[in-house]
Amino acid sequence: MIKQIQWFPGHMFKSLREIREKIKLMDIVIVLLDARLPFSSMNPELKKIISHKPVILLFNKMDLSDQSVLSHWMTHYQHEGYQTLKIDAQTGKNTQKIHPLAQEVLKEKLTREKNKGLKERPIRTMILGIPNVGKSTLINQLSKSSATKTGNTPGVTKAQQWIKLSDQFELLDTPGVLWPKFDDPKVGYHLAITGAIKDKILPEDDVVSYALNFMKTHYPKRLEERYGIKGDLSYVDMLDTIGRLRGCLLKGNEIDYQRVYHIILTDIRGKQLGGLSFDRLEHVSV
Ligand code: G4P
């Protein structure tokens, strides 16, 4: 059974208000989504606020996602008019493509400025995303990117409210935290499974139950390969199978379920079960 969760609408409205106030100052808005959660890591209210601005959607943690599902989502968002790019902010894969893409999107504006005799300048932006999606990791990558090319001292310089990331971007000095919105309880589970929301918000047992049943439906082969789970086992039978396989036993040969939960969530959040995607286009009304 999927439970409804309490969330923090106060935080969400505060951050959306801040974004609305600052949006005028941006050349372009960068929204960082979790490649495994292209729907759950987006905020529908944000879409309205940014609708009149150039936007790049970055799908971060591509290394952890299911590439074929991700490519469907990217096409979906492209049809909605967004520029999209998948990246891995941790290793820096594709992050060097962000600036050229932003320049391309802003070509007319930048050419106009050049024709007026204005000198080339960094692109003003804001990096928005839900907690833990990789904002700081990306900012670190971007602050390194052109320093190696130019031989300048790498890093971040701060002028008033803008943070200069190398010579490519100027970032507004706000946390950029975007609170997810989950009227749909599935969104809450998907955020919990990937670790975007703290483990305490939803009961762990519910999260693991949702996760294992999801894996059984969408990735049965991976369950078989990693844990030897075959066929239509019940949730408890799946837990017991994993517990015995991994020696998660208490005195009297009882299964230590807490340890089993931990193993499952760690495997799902890492790469041990291969690339996974939790949001499915066919399951959400977008
Ligand atoms: P935030 O500022 O948006 O809150 O996120 P942050 O950069 O702190 O990143 C959260 C975690 O996600 C970090 O892991 C970071 O290394 C990881 N991460 C960011 N980008 C990627 C990516 O493209 N691929 C992978 N695999 N991981 C990425 P952490 O430091 O281990 O933190 P945690 O996992 O203990 O929360």
Image (cartoon, helix red, strand yellow):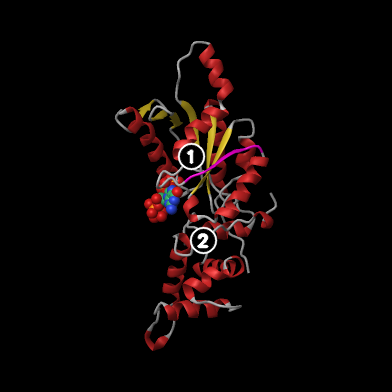
Q: Kindly identify which residue carries mark 1.
A: 176
Return the residue nearer the eye: 245 or 162.
Answer: 245
Q: In the structure shown, which secondary structural element does the residue marked by tag 2 occupy?
A: helix
Q: Of the residues tagged 2 and 1, which is closer to the observer? A: 2
User: In the image, which residues are magenta?
Assistant: 81-87
Residue 154 x/y as whole percent: 32, 32
Question: What amino acid does circle 1 point to?
Answer: Gly
- 167 to the left or right of 23: left
Question: Of the numbered discs in the image, which one, if any, rests on residue 137?
Answer: none
Quarter occupied by the N terminus: bottom right
The alpha-carbon separation of the residues under discs 2 and 1 comes to: 22 Å
Residue 197 x/y as whole percent: 49, 55
Badge 1 local density, few (<14 within 10 Å), some, or many (20+)?
many
Q: Residue at x 58, y 79 (%)?
A: 233
Residue 169 x/y as whole percent: 44, 29
Q: Residue at x 45, y 19 (%)?
A: 120
Badge 2 local density, few (<14 within 10 Å), some, or many (20+)?
many
Residue 22 appears anywhere in the view: no
- 31 to the left or right of 135: right
Q: Residue at x 66, y 54 (%)?
A: 281
Outermost right residue: 285
